[in-house]
Image (cartoon, grey):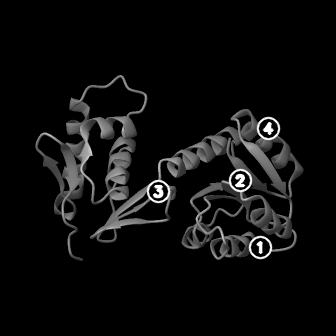
């Protein structure tokens, strides 16, 4: 059972989102101010923080900055905010937010995102703001990929494939490991990996190579020098 610190001064959010998190089996710790949040972080060691940026005593971005400079800088943080401007999202991600949800939101969606972040943590692949390999840049929370600064459109499966390889840049990934990570629900054949890798290679061109290791699986080629 994960310990989730829910930081929001809105009673409705505390009750409704807290209920969804509890239903998913999490132990919910509650804080309605920045001071309560920082005290809970130090005293109760949560596994994940859901953080509203609008708090009565301190801006949430400052709370995020302090979390990243605390004794638990690696704790995943999912940010909730009514601020929809791109500059706010970029600033939050730059300070170390692992995911970002704009109000009004679906509490079920937030609960699912919490679950996804916790799974990555258990698998040793906690979210990071940006993944880079040579001239390729992937922003997990924004679901964006850029090559030499230009955005490239990928399908959800292609995006998941690329993220998988960028999170394990020096490993050979077996076909079964790729299938399990990108198609966890099953019901696909081994050939689907080749089809989606082909699409990913066409879209990335010479910016990134995914090499076949005969009889083993796949790995990233050397990064392209910017």
Q: Which of marks 3 and 1 is nearer the N terminus?
A: 1
Q: Position of residue 5 (x, y in %)?
A: 75, 54
Q: How far apart are marks 1 and 2 (CA)?
A: 16 Å
Q: Mark 2 points at which residue?
A: 103
Observer-side mark, 4 or 2, equals 4
Left or right of 79, for residue 186: left
* Quadrant of the snapshot with the C terminus: bottom left
Q: Quadrant of residue 158?
A: top left
Note whether residue 81 is visible: no
* Mark 3 vs 1: CB contact within 8 A: no
Q: Mark 4 points at which residue?
A: 19
Q: Which of marks 4 and 3 is nearer the N terminus?
A: 4
Left or right of 53, for residue 90: left
Observer-side mark, 4 or 1, equals 4
Observer-side mark, 3 or 2, equals 3
Other-residue count near label 4 (Cα within 10 Å), few / some / many at <14 / 14–19 / ≥20? some
Note whether residue 16 is visible: yes
Q: Position of residue 163 (x, y in %)?
A: 37, 53
- SS at mark 2? loop
Q: How far apart are marks 4 and 2 (CA)?
A: 18 Å
Q: Which residue lies furthest to the top in this view?
A: 187
Q: Residue 59 carries which label?
A: 1
Q: Position of residue 196 (x, y in %)?
A: 26, 40
């Amino acid at each position: 059972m994960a310990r989730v610190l829910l930081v929001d001064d809105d009673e409705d959010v505390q009750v409704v989102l807290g209920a969804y998190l509890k239903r998913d089996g999490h132990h919910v710790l509650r804080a309605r101010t920045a001071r309560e949040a920082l005290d809970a972080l130090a005293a109760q060691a949560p596994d994940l923080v859901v953080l509203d940026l609008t708090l009565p005593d301190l801006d949430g971005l400052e709370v995020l900055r302090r979390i990243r400079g605390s004794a638990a800088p690696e704790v995943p943080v999912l940010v909730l905010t009514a601020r929809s401007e791109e500059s706010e999202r970029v600033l939050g991600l730059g300070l170390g937010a692992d995911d970002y949800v704009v109000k009004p939101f679906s509490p079920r969606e937030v609960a699912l995102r919490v679950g996804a972040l916790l799974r990555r943590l258990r698998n040793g692949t906690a979210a990071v703001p940006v993944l880079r390999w040579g001239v390729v840049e992937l922003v997990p929370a924004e679901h964006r990929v850029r090559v030499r600064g230009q955005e490239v459109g990928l399908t959800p499966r292609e995006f998941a494939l690329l993220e998988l390889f960028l999170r394990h840049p020096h490993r050979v990934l077996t076909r079964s490991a790729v299938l399990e990570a990108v198609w966890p629900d099953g019901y696909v054949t081994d050939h689907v990996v080749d089809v989606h890798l082909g699409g990913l290679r066409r879209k990335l061109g010479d910016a990134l190579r995914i090499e076949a290791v005969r009889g083993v699986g796949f790995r990233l080629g050397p990064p392209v020098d910017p």
